[in-house]
Amino acid sequence: MTLHLDDDELVSCVACGLCLPHCPTYRVTGEESASPRGRIAAMRAVQWSGAPLEGDFTRFMDLCVQCRACEAVCPSSVPFGHLMEGARETLASDTRYQPGWRRAGYRVLGRHRLLLTASTALAVGQRLRLVPRRFGLPRLALRRRPLVATGNDVWLFTGCVMDAWMRETHAAVMRVLAAAGAGVALPGPGAACCGALHEHAGLVEDAQRLARRVIGAFPGEAPVLVDSAGCGAALKGYGRLLGTPDAAEFSRRVMDVHEWLAARVDALPVPARRFPQLVAVQDPCHLRHVQKAHAHVRTVLGRYADLVELDDEGLCCGAGGAYAALHPDMAADIRARKVAAIARTGAVVVASANPGCAMHLAVAGLDVRHPLEIVDEVIRDGR
Ligand code: SF4
Ligand code: SF4
């Protein structure tokens, strides 16, 4: 039995334990098996000693949120995200780790028309009170206004769930880009899903197929801007996922939308009035630990609102893509720490640049908005 992981990567952990306080599942459980160090030890036991894949090993891997906070603080540069994706790829191919119903759910994300139809059905169900609140869905729109391209200076990646459930956020982002003088091009249906959730689930071939489709939907050389941190991290990783020069070139064009705006912040209008409430900034893990682009949110949003920092050093909120749906109890326990950190700031509005985090935190009753929705509101109020 082997995990097909790179031995050099696996051996790079020196078991120092410095990552443990940054791991959300370790913080909740206090158990070594739920820590990065414990998970690496379990990977070694399978790869080097033939320990079984099913049972404890699968549970230890599955409980990881894949936040990559451990990777960001590791003094030995252990590529934990790569190791975890490799472990899950083997689990998905060699065990029943991803049963048919889960694979079918992930497949819907890449079929945009079906996703839109299902979302409309869910919206009707919400109006009829047939969808329990504990599902954590935002109030879905019965109708979605189409987005209209405004030029070709930059592309905006629209994605799957974000386009189906939060299209108004895209509209606000496009207005802010227009205020900065940028015309926005919109992709065709090929850009309907980035494949991040598939990759995290170990369904690497599905993720690669979606990545090739996304790359084909953004011809030319214009920057590809992303307003969802998880999708942005995935698109920036296509070079490694596909291992081709074209994919690497595409990834070089990808920027988080705040990253692009921060370099042009003086082109944005001077606010007539600032946002009236204090805003707590929540850093999505894939913006902070993976893209390392979280400072740009502050550069852009700080021009329009008074910001306050959390004191939890970017600890994960527990959303984790599909994690909150698959591990609701652990996700809620992790979220409780984030909610407490937000409460300590005294802010009533939270800015989050990732739709999954925004939805997960909103379930706890918080007023969570995309940073550029706040910027858009201030700019529009000043007109
Ligand atoms: S992953 Fe890095 S920080 Fe964590 S125990 Fe191993 S070497 Fe130390
Ligand atoms: S990726 Fe996040 S949840 Fe997983 S081991 Fe690292 S810190 Fe813990």
Image: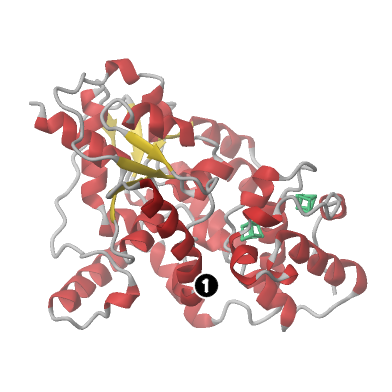
Q: Is residue 161 above or below residue 377?
A: below
Residue 33, given in percent of the width and then of the height, sits at 73, 71
Write the residue at 45% across / 43% down.
216
Q: Return the residue nearer the eye: 153 or 368.
A: 368
Relative placement, left or right, of 244 versus 346 is right
Q: Amino acid at mark 1?
A: Met
Write the residue at 18% across / 75% down.
126
Residue projecting furthest to the right: 49
Relative placement, left or right, of 148 versus 74 is left
Q: Is residue 146 above or below residue 2?
A: above
Q: Return the residue nearer the eye: 195 or 85.
A: 85
Disc 1, SS: helix
Q: Is residue 339 above or below residue 32?
A: above
Which quadrant of the figure has residue 62?
bottom right
Query: Count the marks: how many?
Result: 1
Q: Is residue 56 visible?
A: yes
In which quadrant is the C terminus drawn? top left
Residue 241, given in percent of the width and then of the height, sits at 62, 49
Mark 1: few/some/many CA within 10 Å (<14, 14-19, 20+): many
Residue 227, given in percent of the width and then of the height, sits at 37, 42
Residue projecting furthest to the top: 266
Write the residue at 73% across / 57% down.
83
Residue 84, given in percent of the width and then of the height, sits at 69, 60
In which quadrant is the N terminus drawn? bottom right
Q: Which residue is mark 1?
A: 330
